[in-house]
Image (cartoon, rainbow, N blue to C red):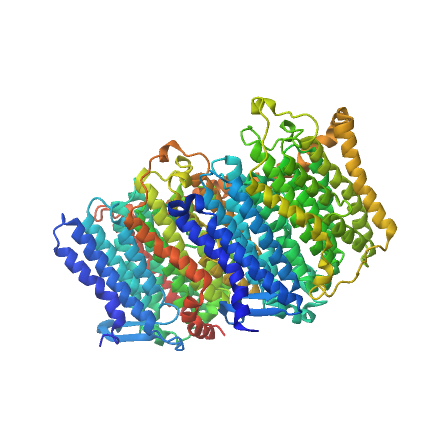
Amino acid sequence: MFKAHLLSWILWFPLLGIILVWFVPRDKVRLIKWITFLALLFDLVLSCVLLKDFNFAESGFQFVEKANWIELINAKYFLGVDGISVLFVPLSVLVSVLCVLISWDSIKYRVKEFYLCLLFTNIAMVGVFCALDLFLFYVFWEAMLIPLYLIIGIWGGPRRIYATLKFFLYTFFGSIFMFVAILYLFIKTGTFDYLELSRHSFPIEVEKLLFLGFAFAFAVKIPMWPVHTWLPDAHTEAPTAGSVILAGILIKIGAYGLLRFCLPLFPHASLYFSKLILILSVIAIIYGGLACLAQEDLKRLIAYSSVSHMGFVTLGIFSFNPVAIKGAILQMINHGIVTGALFMCVGIIYDRTKTRQISYYGGLASTMPFYAALFMIFTLASIGLPGTNGFVGEFMILLGTFLKCKAIVFFAALGVIIGAAYMLWLYQRVFFQNVSENVKNLPGLKFNEIAAVLPMVFFVFLIGLYPKVVLAFMDTSVKALLLYLK
Amino acid sequence: MGAEIKIIIAAIPILPLLASVITLILGRRFFKEASFVLPVLGILISFFFSLFVLSQVLHGKTFEFDLFAWIVSDSLKVGFGFLIDSLSIMMVCMVLSLSLLIHIYSIGYMEGDPGFYRFFAYISLFTFSMLALVMSNNLLQLYLGWEAVGLCSYLLIGFWYEKKSAADAAKKAFIVNRIGDFGFALGIFLLFSAVGGLYYHQVFDNLPLIQGKTISFLGIKWSLPFLISFLLFMGAMGKSAQVPLHVWLPDAMEGPTPVSALIHAATMVTAGVFMVARLHPLYLISPGALELVALTGTFTCFMAATIAPTQFDIKRVIAYSTLSQLGYMFMACGVGAFAAGMFHLFTHAYFKALLFLAAGSVIHAFHHAPDPNDIRIMGGLRKYMPYTFFTFLIGALALSGFPGFSGFFSKEGILISAYLSPYPWGKLVWLVGVFVAFLTSFYSFRLVFVVFFGEFRGGSIFHGEKPHESPLVMVIPLMLISVGAIFAGYLDIPGFLKSTLAHEPVHPHHGEHFFQNLLALIAGLSGILVAWWVYIKNPELKELFPRKFPGIYRFLYNKWWFDEVYHEVIVKPVLFLSRRLVVGFSDLFVIEGIVNGSARVVGGIAGAFRRVHTGIVNHYAVFTLIGIIIYLLVFFYLK
């Protein structure tokens, strides 16, 4: 009973938290936080069970649950995970848990609503990764927007209204095309069932349009160049937890969508458009990196670095090489960990100084040595230093892509140089040189902040030194995925 | 191979790593002034282990095994593993012996520094990284060590990060190395795609697969072995500071002097030479790549030797000398004399570390001065710092290739190998090598005479007092390293390496080619003589060169304008591109313009509905509906 419905348990358990928090008076702030934290923590335990019981040898979907949902349109409640999605379930929950920790003291008003939003986000995130019915997927996909819209719009920075509107319109605009494509699929086939759809084939011209419909929605979410401009604004204005969820999970959903839907459902179109996407990816890598060099705002810089890093992900996916695709999935996880952690770190000093201007800081390595060391670790992981997780992902992507197209990798690897330049320059301006008057007497890290960041340090090194813990999940599923593209 | 020997081999790099991590975590709170204990202990034990392994290798054994699998995915399989043969054990023993002595020296040198624990954690981490690099049995772990030593170098150059110049130098070192590593990484990809594996034995076994092949890359047709070797050599140019990627090393002197000795003279910067020697079968099948190595080395060797005599910063002079000596090593590799290059790497490690540490001892005495590295405030120090003087003199003699000192043997080996080499560029390499031998001894003894002879010129800084000799904890390591600097040349390193570098085309013997040896010897001795003539006998002469050839002097003094040219040609355009084009024009003007413009158009269309709907999201819903209808129409039309 429990095992058979494990995914539903993971998916809906936070609902219990929502109900409990709902009935707590809004001034009982501590209780609200603890309920949210414990609910998500238990959810994390559940998702660890998922990892433990996952069968590496099985290439298809596991933990499948299927029930009729809206019979009128033949939409089903259809959940399941394979080697590509299984890792994102615990990652989503982990990010949510850490978001509770990092927001513990920094969210000061409308606390109840904030934690309700977080719990709601968690349901939507997990749902996106488990849904195997296109309609259900679309519901979760759009449902994610609502809490994030609120999180940025209510608890964000000074320009939050502009940012949140832009974020919403941009991604919603992208989604319509996917929605239309989904409708078309339904009208033609009479089903939203992913497995059934993946057995269908369409005329190549139709396939191309359907591919574009899906891919555009995903491209906005990832975000690929040139539809990336919502990201810097959204990241910059979002509260720390919002940025962490955006960077950690939300933008991964785009890349996940490409892997889950575009490649298997529209293989011919994927091959047809692969050159284009590879080129856009390389542009994103270099363009994002160059844009980072010009940023004066901590969060904007890290946001643009996401554009660059996600370029590596799309590069890996569309090189159709098993090493590169695994590298891309790994890089999605890595980016979630590292960029999520970097946003937490920025949030930590933002809470103390209320500014994100890089020039405001200086010499933090002297005043907050422990914090500086943590930031250094994430900087190095972001740069892709061997021994950290960032290296394994980048290396696998570039190596795999190299086997397909050498020139593309030549330009993509230039992005690695730029990556080192902007991150180290950032580090120098914030942590080195003379201690700025502004940061002389900053208080040290609090327990909740350390607890939020330290797990990320652990994963940076774990994946960096022993990536097998992650790669083992993907092997058979990626192999199966590539069969579609033969 | 027994399990014990595996454990011992694995422990050699792991002990310094453990010591480093523990010191880094607990040092600030708990160890404080005792932070050196664990790192020193770890390296001491590792050193004894390495001697044991050396004794095994001397009995003709080699070891290769994987510790555990690192990245495994489809055709890509790499592990953390070790290959212990004469080449790697030589490096291991050299690294550990110097690291140990420099750790001890640093106890005195870094005393009282607020970052005391950090320093020991970093150099211990460096020792681990360097060992991981040289002991590796595959290219990817080499790359890990390669980047990790780069990280330690970054952290240690920027050790006094409050100084902007130090922070700048650290960043510069990392980024310039990244440029080299860009090529190195591409080389690894290309090698993997050509031979299907990254273990050395896989590479060497499959060399016939790539020999004579061509490949088209970026629209150009390349010889495959050349392209692989060239890309890998780019990494070596960065790490071993060869032109045009040499600009970071002189700036790296911002780091504490023990760091300059260990990392930026003896060990890390020689990693490029080691890599080329390690992959020598690959280079041997690509004469074009060998030529490139030889000429790069020759040019760097010459260029750095012309800059060194014009500098006034004692550490920078030695740094340029390091560039120049690294050039010698690449010269040797480029003429196919890998063992001669490794021999010079070995002797150079000792005498150059010695020079840096002795210079450090001087700087330690001058630490009150506004610029303690400036040789113009020194002078006559042999009276006040006799041990330092004596050891510095030994280092300078060894560097100059004075007969009987270690540098004499190794430099002679390189020059003769070049002279006898079967390659057409060998004679040119030899000629430049001999000339640089003259310059080398000139600038070395310029330092000796200016710093240790003549009158003491730092009176105002010391308020009439005199500088003192450094404490024993610094002087004893100096003396021990001077033993190495003298006697390292008597070890038959080329013979020892024969088992690994068996492809050696020429085997020069001592005593033959009397004339060529004599010429090199005369070049070296005359350099000392000229330095004596200019700096002791006729001090007014030293102004002669700047006065007579101000243009050339400025050119040399400003290091051939490399930094300035790079600033104009690379740094400025990239920043322009980033600020004006990417962010200013493309991102904020074009893309945002389109996005906001279309939002305005939508707003305009939706304006018609404004009486019914309020709020922009609702406007948008209308647009959504229109979009859906249009899209569906398109679809059904297509059907």
**Coordinates of residue B401 in the picture (x, y in percent):** 75, 45
Q: How many marks?
A: 0
Where is A67 relative to B118, above or below?
Answer: below
Is residue A108 found left or right of A162 in the rendered image? left
- Quarter assignment of residue A463: bottom left
Residue at image position (28%, 72%) is A78
Is residue A140 found left or right of B26 in the rendered image? left
The answer to whether residue B143 shows anywhere in this view is no
The N terminus of chain B: image quadrant:
bottom right
**Coordinates of residue B584 in the picture (x, y in percent):** 47, 40
Residue at image position (44%, 72%) is A475
Is residue B132 found left or right of B292 in the rendered image? left
**Coordinates of residue A185 in the picture (x, y in percent):** 35, 70
Where is A277 relative to B471, above or below?
Answer: below
Q: B639 or B563: which is nearer to us? A: B563
Where is A462 relative to A233, above or below?
Answer: below
